């Protein structure tokens, strides 16, 4: 052991069984609170139903269904779909199971971050960090951070943490095998979600490349060189879609925004990051003064964490230096990419920044543990107060969600629509992705009602270009003996913006309907002849 490392360990707080035990109890409570938040916040919708659609399609058509699916660039094909399949095979496919997967991803990220903290700062720091991270507030779990949403970048964060654990072990042991395992995790992550490229692939490539040169005569340098090659090949394979073998996956598109757009993006990022890190118990995280207080507190905490971790890492082992460097580069990379990118309005959410939540906490734990005994009393008090306020604000944001009986959010609109259609003898048809609840209506109706997603564009009724299968728009997809199929028309602000024009387009394209119904803002066109292959691509 080097003298510098021995001095750092001597200045760090020793393992404290009492603190670890209390933190473990707090972790259990925090995970319970976050689970209750997750099931009460997320109402099953069409996006949440994508894993169910993939599962049922695979059960019916086999592997060809996965190739027929119209993916978005963040496709989750290798990072999430196998996990969903395993959970569905064990617990059954249902909206409740999908919601549980989202929370399990959050819990896994807490555990993986704690594992990194253990490697960096010891058991006590890891236990305390896991306890604090578990108390995510509803904004972090929900509308700002999406940390427990079942189909978003949180799964990419979990794979990033796993890749970093393996990469650090590869450098620490000089292991080619562990470097290859880290590269495989990077590939799975990056081919499934472009977010992973700036979040973990490029940080690991840059950090390992520097260490491979700086420590080329050491075992750590050989491990870093193997990691550099493995992650570089993984990024290349992901970017090229395995050199065309996965050509059915769309390539990511990145467009630069204007200077005004950069300012807007930075403001959006700051606002949502502040809401995710609220430290004011029972405060309205949407209030301007709360946002400003939370942002200032977060900015100071992150700055102290980054600077403190960077300073401590200079005197530490290569594997710890890799963790710190990759975490810092990850946060800088995703914030920079988000700031300069032109994004749809709905994409301007804190779901881009799970690494701020987990890597920020990791760096803070490491910076505090390094030289804890030598820090002034006010600094230790400030760190403890921030952690306590963070956890308390998370727990007290909505105590009714976890102190009382469970209150899972139900898709009442989808259930009511399914009941109406079934009452009219209509069980198979087409409608807008959001407006007709197209993907979720099958699961919530127990499979009795099926709606395939369509959009009204260019004066025509068209197949939805994403989150759909080409196999759905064939006559063979209709149930045998089907006598009536329908088209739901509704102005949902996306797939149909003018209800009369959408209805006219459907009739012009599909022919006159046998029946026309109206129900709570919907126009339901019922056809007694096949219409699937008349829907335009």
Image (tube, rainbow, N blue to C red):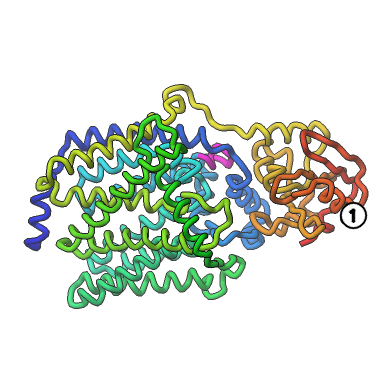
| Rendered-image quadrant of the N terminus | bottom left
Q: Is residue 3 left or right of residue 361?
A: left
Which corner quadrant of the image does residue 418 belong to?
top right
Counting the numbered discs, the total is 1
Give coordinates of residue 289: x percent, y percent.
40, 38
Asked which quadrant contains residue 27, the reply is top left
* Residue at x 15%, y 42% (from the top left corner): 15
Give the residue pinned by disc 1: 508
Instruction: Please state if 178 lies on the left or on the right of 507 as rendered.
Output: left
Q: Secondary structure at mark 1?
A: helix
Residue at x 31% of width, y 60% of height: 328
Q: Main secondary structure of the magenta part?
A: helix
Residue 428 is situated, as x and y percent measured from the top left of the image, at: 78, 44
447 is higher (above) or lower (below) than 242: above
Q: Position of residue 120 (x, y in %)?
A: 22, 54
Residue interval drawn in magenta: 92-99
Task: Specify the quadrant of the image occupied by residue 166.
Answer: bottom left
> In this view of the protein, can residue 299 be seen by the observer?
yes
Up-down relation of residue 375 to residue 307 (above or below): above
Nearest to the observer: residue 139 or residue 115: 139
Disc 1 residue crowd, few under 14, some 14–19, many 20+, Cα 10 Å: few
* Residue 441, position as x, y percentages in the image: 68, 40
> What residue is shown at x 83% (from left), y 50% (from top)?
501
């Amino acid at each position: 052991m080097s003298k510098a490392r021995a001095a750092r360990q001597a200045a760090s707080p020793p393992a404290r069984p009492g603190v670890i035990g209390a933190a473990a109890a707090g972790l259990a409570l925090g995970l319970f609170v976050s689970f209750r938040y997750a099931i009460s916040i997320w109402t099953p919708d069409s996006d949440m139903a994508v894993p169910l659609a993939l599962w049922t399609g695979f059960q019916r058509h086999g592997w060809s269904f996965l190739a027929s699916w119209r993916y978005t660039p963040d496709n989750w094909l290798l990072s999430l779909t196998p996990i969903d399949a395993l959970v569905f095979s064990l617990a059954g496919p249902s909206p409740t199971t999908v919601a549980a997967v989202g929370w399990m991803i959050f819990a896994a990220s807490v555990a993986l971050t704690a594992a990194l903290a253990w490697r960096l700062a010891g058991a006590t720091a890891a236990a305390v960090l896991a306890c604090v991270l578990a108390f995510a507030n509803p904004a972090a779990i929900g509308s700002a951070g999406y940390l427990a949403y079942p189909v978003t970048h949180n799964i990419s964060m979990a794979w990033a943490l796993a890749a970093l654990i393996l990469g650090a072990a590869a450098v620490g042991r000089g292991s080619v095998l562990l470097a290859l395992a880290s590269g495989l995790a990077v590939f799975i992550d990056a081919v499934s979600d472009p977010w992973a490229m700036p979040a973990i692939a490029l940080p690991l490539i840059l950090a390992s490349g520097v260490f491979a040169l700086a420590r080329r005569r050491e075992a750590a340098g050989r491990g870093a060189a193997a990691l550099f090659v493995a992650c570089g090949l993984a990024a290349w394979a992901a970017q090229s879609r395995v050199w065309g073998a996965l050509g059915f996956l769309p390539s990511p598109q990145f467009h630069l925004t204007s200077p005004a757009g950069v300012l807007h993006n930075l403001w959006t990022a700051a606002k949502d990051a502040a809401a995710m890190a609220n430290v004011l118990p029972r405060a309205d995280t949407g209030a301007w003064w709360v946002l400003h207080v939370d942002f200032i507190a977060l900015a100071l905490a992150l700055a102290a964490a980054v600077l403190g971790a960077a300073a401590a890492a200079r005197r530490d082992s290569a594997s710890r230096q890799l963790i710190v460097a990759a975490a810092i580069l990850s946060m800088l990379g995703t914030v920079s990419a988000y700031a300069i990118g032109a994004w749809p309005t709905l994409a301007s959410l804190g779901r881009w920044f799970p690494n701020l939540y987990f890597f920020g906490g990791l760096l803070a734990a490491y910076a505090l543990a390094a030289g804890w005994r030598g820090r002034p009393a006010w600094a230790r008090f400030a760190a403890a107060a921030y952690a306590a306020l963070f956890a308390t604000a998370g727990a007290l944001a909505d105590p009714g969600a976890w102190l009382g009986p469970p209150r899972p959010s139900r898709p009442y609109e989808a259930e009511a629509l399914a009941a109406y259609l079934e009452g009219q003898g209509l069980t198979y048809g087409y409608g807008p992705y959001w407006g007709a609840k197209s993907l979720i209506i099958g699961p919530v109706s127990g499979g009795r009602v099926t709606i395939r997603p369509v959009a009204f564009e260019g004066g025509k009724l068209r197949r939805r270009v994403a989150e759909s299968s080409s196999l759905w728009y064939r006559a063979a997809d209709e149930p045998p003996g089907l006598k009536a199929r329908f088209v739901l028309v509704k102005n949902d602000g996306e797939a149909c913006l003018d209800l009369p024009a959408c209805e006219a387009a459907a009739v012009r394209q599909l022919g006159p309907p046998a029946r026309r119904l109206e129900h709570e803002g919907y126009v339901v066109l019922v056809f007694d002849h096949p219409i699937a292959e008349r829907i335009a691509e």
